[in-house]
């Protein structure tokens, strides 16, 4: 019985000894886009007495990962939490083009195709609970 257990453990650890990666979280065909936010309606950032206006009180966890494909015509969103349906708004600040869509975060990884025209882009992700996350990138 002890030999069987040792054999199973040794087989489980074999990929680590052999230098075989079990997974990789980096890909050569995408560029990560940092996202910030997590504020909701009335949770600061709005100025005045109610909104706070002095910026975030603490660092918050952003449950969304965003990456731009090498083709420059597709965003890949990875959802680390179930946020329900989220609205993604992508604005090309250079050309004025706006693209929007609703994504199901339960799927985990969701592609968002867009025109890929050159310019400075702004991403806004809004959850059904009112929280928003944002980021920007250039093509």
Image (cartoon, rainbow, N blue to C red):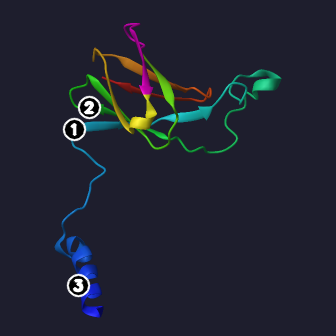
Residue closer to the observer: 124 or 83 = 83
Is 98 on the left or on the right of 45, as rendered?
Answer: left
**Magenta segment boundaries in residue numbering:** 92-103
| Pointer 1 or 2: first along the chain | 1
Q: CA distance from mark 1 to mark 2?
A: 6 Å
Residue 39 coordinates in the image, percent (x, y): 63, 32
Q: Label 2, secondary structure: give it.
A: strand
Asked if residue 132 is positioned above or below residue 19 in the image, the reply reads above
| Pointer 1 or 3: first along the chain | 3
Residue closer to the observer: 99 or 1 = 1
Residues tagged 1 and 2 counted as in contact (Cβ below 8 A): yes
Q: Label 1, secondary structure: give it.
A: loop
Tell me, for residue 69, which label it has, or none.
Answer: 2
Tell me, for residue 7, which label it has, or none.
Answer: 3
Residue 137 coordinates in the image, percent (x, y): 38, 27
Residue reaching furthest top?
96
């Amino acid at each position: 019985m002890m030999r069987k257990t040792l054999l199973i453990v040794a087989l489980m650890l074999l990929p680590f000894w052999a230098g075989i990666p079990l997974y990789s979280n980096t890909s050569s065909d995408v560029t990560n886009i940092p996202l910030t936010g997590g504020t909701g309606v009335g949770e600061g950032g709005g100025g005045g007495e109610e909104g706070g206006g002095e910026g975030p009180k603490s660092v918050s966890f952003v449950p969304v990962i965003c990456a731009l494909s090498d083709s420059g015509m597709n965003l890949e969103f990875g959802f680390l939490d179930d946020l329900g349906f989220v609205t993604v708004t992508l604005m090309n600040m250079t050309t004025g083009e706006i693209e929007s869509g609703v994504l199901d975060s339960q799927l985990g990884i969701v592609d968002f195709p867009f025109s890929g025209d050159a310019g400075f882009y702004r991403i806004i992700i809004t959850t059904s609970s009112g929280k928003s996350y944002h980021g920007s990138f250039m093509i």
